[in-house]
Image (cartoon, grey):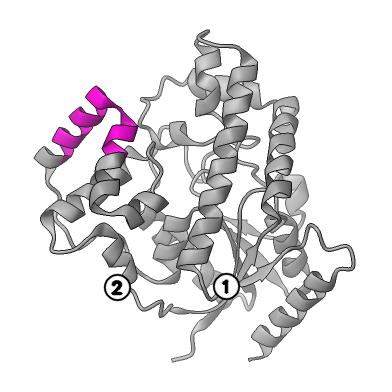
Amino acid sequence: MTKEKLIVICGPTGVGKTALSLDLAQKFSGEVVNGDSMQVYRHLDIGTAKITPAERGDIPHHLFDLKEVYEDYSVADFKRDASTAIAKIHERGQLPILVGGTGLYLEALLYDFDLGAEVDDHPEFREEMAAYAAQYGALALHRKLQDVDPNAAETIHPNNQRRVIRALEVCRFSSGKFSDQKQAQDHDSPYDLLLIALVRDRQKLYEQINQRVLEMVKQGLLDEAKWLYQQGLPEDAQAMKAIAYKELFPYLRGEEGLEDGIQRLQKNTRHYAKRQLTWIRHRLPEAEIYDLVDDPQKTNYQRLQEAVKAFLQS
């Protein structure tokens, strides 16, 4: 059976993913599918760097603005919705272009698996771990994961408490590790994939991130964060964990100055970019790497265009 073609554009913030997706969609009759777990939320636009309706133009975009901020959106939800969107795009004779995003979501879709699915739930264990985190903090809980599964700890942020606890649960109640379930996959995808990873010199990337945060503040990020804060959501709500908002909550509570929140946001965004690059290196070794930002002669861009053409003709 012939696999459906799918182009995937991944990479950290600020490397040109959105611009490339629009360019390829225009040139190759494409439609864009969102692969970012936070861009599914309505009203979270500036902080998630969501593409605007004006930027989209006449190119169809899917899986944006699906949920209200009080709703969860799981890996299984994304996998279902994205696979459906991709199938319908092919039915229209168009090329799906997946832009992301969130490593866990992309991996579940691209390689057709759901992490931790083989291990039953153990509510008492989860409650015990949640209580431990409440008493000793998220970093202490994350250190537990580092002790038993350092590979999983490297890819799961300490603030993602539910995922940390799930990883600990798999380690505790199965014969292997949480990360083993990832390694067990042979990277055989249900799709015919062209994986494009956009990167940039790390120091230049970090400088750009710092500047980008300042631009987001000028664009109205603080108002967006204030709106989210005023929704009264629990701290563990999925939308409340989005980088760009939670860093500003202490300022909104009057606990610190705005400059402290901005510096924390810059730092956390840099760390997130580093984790994204690590994920690409370890989980998508077959991805083709391009730097399109520091490319004055457009040689990398031309090389990428040729790769896309060859992929579509194969």
Outermost residue, top side: 254
Which image quadrant: the N terminus? bottom left
Judge whether residue 227 can be spotted in this image.
no
Q: Quadrant of residue 99?
A: bottom right
Left or right position of 264 against 181: right
The picture places residue 77, in percent across and down from the top left corner, at 38, 54
Image vertical order of residue 267 relative to residue 296, above or below: above
Q: Amino acid at mark 2?
A: Ala
Q: Is residue 299 left or right of residue 246?
A: right
Q: Where's residue 163, x and y in %?
A: 31, 46
The total number of labels drawn is: 2
The picture places residue 13, in percent across and down from the top left corner, at 64, 48
Mark toward the start of the polypeptide (1 vs 2): 2
Residue at 63 percent across and 91 percent down: it is 314
Q: Which residues are magenta?
A: 126-142
* Residue with the mark numbered 1: 287
**What residue sits right under mark 2 in the picture?**
184
Does the stretch in magenta take in 38? Answer: no
* Secondary structure under the numbered disc 2 in the rendered image: loop
What main secondary structure does the magenta stretch of the protein show? helix
Check the image and report above or below for 79 versus 266.
Answer: below
Marks 1 and 2 sit apart, C-alpha to C-alpha, by 19 Å
* Residue drawn 53% across the image and 8% down it: 254
Residue at 63 percent of width and 37 percent of height = 45
Mark 2: few, some, or many residues within 10 Å (few <14, many ≥20)?
Answer: few
Mark 1 belongs to which amino acid? Ala
Q: Secondary structure at mark 1?
A: loop
Q: Between residues 82 and 294, which one lies in front from this camera angle?
A: 294
In the image, is residue 136 above or below residue 73?
above
